[in-house]
């Protein structure tokens, strides 16, 4: 049975997502300092404990990462804000989902850092992400030093940052009473916690978008419009895959929901007095 034509419905939903994305972009371009952390709030006390590796800075960076991916999706699907008809954009089979994945992952990681009511656990999570960053940068620089884009100076600079970062992490951990090695980041485990807390099945969309990013067949067949062009027998067919506007719209909606959930939690943590959480 042919799928119903839900193009108009998809356009209406996209316009709603676009309005949020455009507002976020305008806010970030116009404000010198977004979302100031109020003295005495949970994040303010988190930051006092983790300086110079502030929890608030990490979360705000992830908000910007998620917003940047959503802005790119908005431009692909609907052009620039001045040309706001989504029909002016192009629906890709795979590429849109790479941006959805990036937005989801950044927003959910920020949410994961802020999710615990316990301050020490928030600090531990912030340090986990930063430790992973320093480790990954150094491992990448080892290879980049042998690449035409790099050189020995790239590795040397990465090693300096790694060593300074490791020392800062160890110092902050001791200040917070966190002893022993900082755990490695387990991305799916982290996102699973946020998925359970938001009850939006965001992890499912992250897995689907990851499948699309990695060119997995199951994801492509799930999220695309598939037309069988020829049956060659022996279970062999020629198919045509096209981007599906409605399914992309649902995916974008999940990414927007993830960012909105992070913003709500960030607002709570940056404004509520520390005695309240």
Image (spheres, helix red, strand yellow):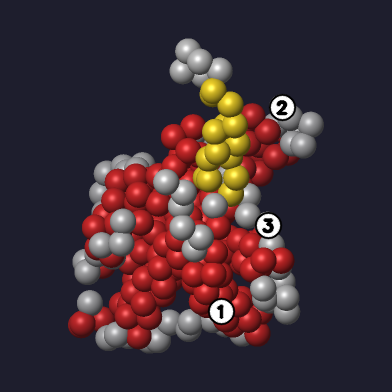
Q: Residues within 10 Å of mark 3 (few under 14, many from 20)?
A: some
Between circles 1 and 3, the one closer to the viewer is 3
Which residue sits at x=51%, y=60%? 5
Provide the residue designation for mark 1.
19
Asked whether residue 219 is in view, the answer is yes
Q: Residue furthest right?
A: 148
Where residue 45 appears, x then y in whole percent?
33, 76
- Depth order, front residue of 226/170: 226
Would you name the residue on which mark 2 appears? Answer: 146
Label 1 or label 3, whichever comes before in sequence order = 1
Of residues 211 and 183, the one nearer the viewer is 211
Which residue lies under the disc numbered 3?
90
Q: Name the residue rendered at 46%, 52% in the picture.
A: 3
Q: Secondary structure at mark 2?
A: loop
- Whether residue 234 is situated above or below residue 223 in the rendered picture: above
Sequence-wise, the earlier of marks 2 and 1 is 1
Image height check: is 142 above or below 277?
Answer: above
Cα distance between the residues tagged 1 and 3: 18 Å
Chain-order first, disc 3 or disc 2: 3
Q: Hey, which quadrant is residue 25 in on the image?
A: bottom right
Task: Pick the residue in front: 172 or 261.
Answer: 261
Q: What residue is drawn where x is 51% and y is 19%? A: 236
The residue furthest front is 1
Mark 2 and mark 1: span between their CA atoms? 45 Å
Say which element carries label 3: loop
- The label nearer to you, 2 versus 1, is 1
| Residue 239 at x, y percent in the picture | 57, 32
Query: Mark 1 packing: few (<14 Cα in 10 Å), some, or many (20+)?
Result: some
Q: Residue 96 at what x, y percent from top left? A: 58, 52
Q: Secondary structure at mark 1?
A: helix
Q: Is residue 128 left or right of residue 135?
A: left
Q: Quadrant of the C terminus?
A: bottom left
């Amino acid at each position: 049975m042919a799928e119903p034509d839900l193009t108009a419905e998809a356009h209406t939903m996209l316009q709603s997502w676009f309005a949020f994305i455009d507002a976020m972009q305008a806010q970030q371009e116009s404000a010198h300092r977004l979302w100031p952390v109020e003295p005495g709030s949970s994040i303010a006390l988190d930051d006092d404990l983790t300086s110079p590796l502030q929890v608030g800075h990490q979360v705000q960076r992830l908000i910007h990462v998620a917003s940047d991916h959503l802005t790119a999706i908005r431009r692909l699907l609907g052009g620039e804000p001045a040309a706001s008809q989504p029909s002016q954009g192009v629906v890709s089979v795979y590429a849109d989902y790479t941006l959805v994945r990036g937005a989801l992952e950044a927003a959910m990681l920020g949410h994961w850092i802020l999710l615990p009511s316990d301050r020490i656990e928030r600090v531990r999570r912030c340090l986990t992400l930063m430790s992973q960053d320093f480790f990954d940068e150094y491992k990448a620089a080892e290879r980049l030093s042998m690449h035409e884009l790099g050189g020995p100076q790239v590795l040397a600079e990465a090693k300096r940052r790694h060593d300074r970062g490791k020392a800062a992490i160890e110092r902050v951990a001791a200040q917070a009473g966190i002893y022993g090695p900082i755990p490695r980041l387990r991305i799916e485990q982290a996102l699973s916690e946020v998925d359970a807390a938001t009850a939006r099945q965001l992890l499912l969309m992250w897995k689907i978008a990851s499948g699309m990013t990695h060119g997995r067949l199951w994801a492509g067949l799930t999220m695309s419009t598939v037309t069988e062009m020829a049956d060659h027998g022996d279970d062999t067919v020629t198919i045509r895959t096209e981007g599906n506007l409605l399914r992309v719209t649902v995916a974008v909606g999940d990414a927007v929901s993830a960012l909105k959930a992070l913003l709500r939690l960030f607002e709570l943590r940056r404004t509520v007095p520390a005695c309240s959480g």
